[in-house]
Structure formats: C-alpha cells, structure tokens
Amino acid sequence: MKAVFSGATIFKNGRFEQGGEAVAKTTSFDSLFIDSTKYIIFPGFADMHVHFREPGFSYKETIATGSASASHAGYTTVCTMPNLNPTPDSVENVKAQLDLINREANIRVLPFGSITRGELGKELADLEAIAPYVCGYSDDGRGVDDNGLMREAMERARALDKLISAHCEDGTQIKDSPEAEWKQIERDIKLVDDIKCKYHVCHISTKESVALIREAKKSGVNITCETAPHYLTLSQVNVRDEGGFRMNPPLREEADRLALIEGIVDGTIDVIATDHAPHSAEERSKGLKSLNGIVGLETAFPILYTKLVKEGIISLERLVELMAQKPYERLGIEPNGFTVYSLDEEYIINPNEFKTKGRSTPYAGERVLGKCLATVCDGTLVYIDDKIIKR
Ligand code: DOR
C-alpha cells in the first residue's frame, strides 16, 4: 500500500519547489491519498544529540518512546549519547543497545560509543572494536579532562575516520562557569589542529565558544559544532523556576544567546541538536537539586520556526540546513526520508501531548506555529496524524 502526498511544496536541492508529489510505503493503511497543497515537505530531520536512556534507565525513556517522540516531530535519524548502563564502550555493550534499537525503533537510531571506559575519563573504550557499530565517540555528560587521553582518543579516531563529539566541560574550572566550556574547547582546538581528526563540539552555549570556533574554522581546523534550541531562544532572563530550567550547560546571559544567533547566521555553528534529555517527574521536581536535562525533540522545529524564521532572523532554508543537511553531512551518511509539516497551524505547547516520557520543557504554554503531519523513514510511513507506526 502507498501513502501519496500530492501538491506539496517540497524542499529539494537547497530550495523549495511547489506542487510536488512524495510517496511512502505503508502496510498500516489501505492506500492513502493526501491533498498536501497546504503542507510543506522537508527532508527528515537529523538530531546528532539525544538521550534515549536504554539500556539502563527505561523509567526515563525507552528506545520506543524516544523514537516515537522523534518521528512525531519529523526526525528520521537520531544519534544517542552513551551515558547508559552498561556504557557502550565494548562490542558486547554496544550490541546490547543495538538489539534494542533493532527491535524497538521506528526511525534510524545511531549510537555514539563512549570515548572512555564507563565514561570515567581514565582509560579509553574499545574504540577500534566498536567502530563498525557506532556513529562516533562521545563522553557526553562530562568532559575528558586528561589531555593525554584526549590526544590518544583523537589519534585513534582519526585512524578509524570516526567523529569525536565532545562535551566540553573542564572539571578543573568552576562548575557551570563559561570558562569550563570554552577552556576545554580551546584545548581541543589545539589538539585537532595538530592531529587532524574529525571533531565536533556538543551543545555550545557561550560567546567565547562561538568566537574560538569561528577563528579555528578560519584557520582550517576540521571542527564543527552544534547548539540547542534553548540556547538560541532563552537566557538567564527567562528562567522562571530553577528546577524546570536546569540543564547542562546552563542557560547563559543574553550576550551569549546573541553570539550564538550570530553563529547560526554566519555559519560558525553548523548544526542544531536538541540534547533531548528526559528524566522522571520526580527527578525534575527537586528545585536546584533536579537532574539536568529538558526534553527537546517535539518542540525544536516549532520553537525555531516561530522564534527565528518568523522573526526574520534566519531563513527557512537555513533552518533546514541546520536541522537536516548539515548533521547528515557531518555524520557522513545519506539523508533519510521526509517529513510533512503544516506551517500555518498555530497551537500551544502542551507537554501532555508529547510522545516522550519526559515532560520537563521550558516551552510549556508557548504559542507556536508548525505541526508535523507525517514522517517517512527509509521509504516507509512511520508517523501520521498522531499515530506512531512501528516498522
Ligand atoms: O542537561 C543535560 N542532560 N546535559 C548533559 O550533559 C547530560 C544530559 C543527561 O543525560 O541528562
């Protein structure tokens, strides 16, 4: 059976063309024909930074709920971070995660392996052995403080032609300070300049990080970076309740937010990733002691479209580049599928309508534009009109 989206505006080769047709396979419906003249079709979004919490923390999120959340928002590809139990630092552990992914995911879920064993920063993971199974290496959640260990990780990642995606947080600096982020980026830029591995910085949040990466790119260092929707649209001035806005890195000052905006406008920042980080309601209800992390998949496009594109800060084409083209390019993989969006539908963000298990978002109650009607992954319909379709 087929689902046919006819008459839509379709994003192709960097621009929008009107009146196109897109087709997907489906076994869940008799053939569907959807007059899509009101809709716009984007390439499937790719998120280089999510936490799907399995194995180890299924009470926060599962591969099934995480990928449902992603497909509900137009993502066809996500990369999961390795702060799991067990840590994907060996073939056995990565395979345990991949078994779950193969059984449960309705989109393409690509695991990052860890850089260090157990993400403990003491010795390197089985980088060569896990290379065929992972999209890159990261110790997300903490920085790799040991310079020698990071150098060796980069050398081995270069030999394997694999990406390192670094959570930069220098443990010798004051926790949550801007320096903790940018000093480790500064160190890594010197290492990457020397070693020439493929290197990407996770969730940058400070103006100094933007400036350092801009300069490094100018001098030809093989560096890319991501920021998240919350660092582009919120700063300390927006924090209403301490618990609900807790994340790592934290929201910064307005000057930082504006520097990040400049970074997405001038190309210093390559990718917008969500850092989708669900926790239980209890873990998020402890005020300043709440665990860090907000959910992000189901708010990313509507928030960015409403607050950046509609406000004239970036074009829709640029947003698609940041959420789809650039992540695929950096991961070195083919774009996957498409998503069908209504840009005119206005609604209020209600976390109870999310497909993720997480409910903690600073955007609850925001009025936004942009709703996902359908998502197609690997040629197959995986989400339509509030229904998640298992593959
Ligand atoms: O806010 C965050 N949550 N930042 C991190 O670095 C880790 C993540 C998580 O795993 O919850």
Image (cartoon, helix red, strand yellow):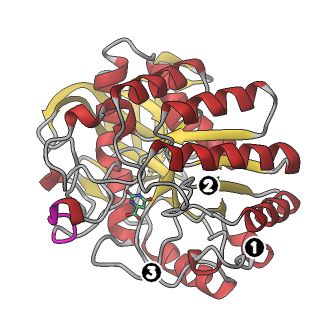
Q: Quadrant of residue 369?
A: top left
Where does the magenta region start and end?
282-287
The residue at 44%/20% (across/down) is 316
Find residue 55 and name its label.
3
Q: Is mark 3 within 8 Å of ligand 1?
A: no
Residue 50 relative to residue 154: left or right: left
Judging depth in this view, the residue of 293 and 146 nearest the camera is: 146
Residue 50: x %, y % from top left:
45, 57
334 or 33, nearer to the observer: 334
Residue sitting at x 16%, y 51%: 351
What secondary structure predominates along the stretch shown in magenta?
loop
Q: Gap in Å between the C-alphas at discs 2 and 3?
A: 22 Å
Q: Considering the image in quadrants, where does the C terminus appear?
A: bottom left
What residue lies at 67% left-to-right and 43% top-to-bottom?
186
Q: Residue tagged by mark 2?
A: 166
Tag 2: residue type?
Ala
Q: Is residue 151 above or below residue 98?
A: above
| Labels 1, 2: front one | 2
Instruction: Kindly identify which residue carries mark 1.
Output: 127
Residue 207 shown in magenta: no
Q: Nearer the viewer, mark 3 or mark 1?
A: 1
| Number of on-image labels | 3
Counting from the top left corner in percent of width and height, residue 379 is at 53, 50
* Residue at the bottom extreme, as displayed: 92
Residue 193 locus on image (x, y percent):
83, 42
